[in-house]
Image: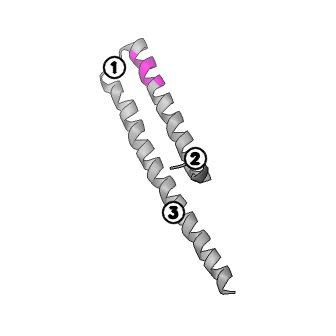
């Protein structure tokens, strides 16, 4: 999607996902290097990726609902 056409909700959701992934990889590396938590630690970034998927679904749904609300308000104004 074009950056100019993204809603505020989608921009915030993208920022949250980006921050979540960076933090999860940093935690994974810190735990792996310091205490050898490599094997089960790989679940941290995997779970973060799933959380990003949920954030994406929520932001897309919120954007669609916001667009429907705007269309409804526009059609009500045109009827008056």
Range covered by the magenta-colored residues: 26-32
Q: Nearer the viewer, residue 5 or 28?
A: 5
Which disc, if any, is residue 38? 1
Sequence-wise, the earlier of marks 3 and 1 is 1
Q: Could you say where residue 8 lies in the image, as x and y percent from the top left?
A: 62, 51
- The kind of secondary structure element at disc 3 is helix
Q: How packed is label 1: few (under 14 Cα within 10 Å), some, or many (20 or more)?
A: some
Q: Could you say where residue 54 lies in the image, as x and y percent from the top left?
A: 43, 49
- The kind of secondary structure element at disc 2 is helix
Q: Is residue 66 magenta?
A: no
Q: Main secondary structure of the magenta part?
A: helix
1 or 2: mark nearer the eye:
2
Q: Answer left or right for 57 relative to 63.
A: left
Q: Could you say where residue 5 lies in the image, as x and y percent from the top left?
A: 58, 53
Q: Nearer the viewer, residue 29 or 31?
A: 29
Sequence-wise, the earlier of marks 2 and 3 is 2
Quickly name the residue at label 3.
64
């Amino acid at each position: 999607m074009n950056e100019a056409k993204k809603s505020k909700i989608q921009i915030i959701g993208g920022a949250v996902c980006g921050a979540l992934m960076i933090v999860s990889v940093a935690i994974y590396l810190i735990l792996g290097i310091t205490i050898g938590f490599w094997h089960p630690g790989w679940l941290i970034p995997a779970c973060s990726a799933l959380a990003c998927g949920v954030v994406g679904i929520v932001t897309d749904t919120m954007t669609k609902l916001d667009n429907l609300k705007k269309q409804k308000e526009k059609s009500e104004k045109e009827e008056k």
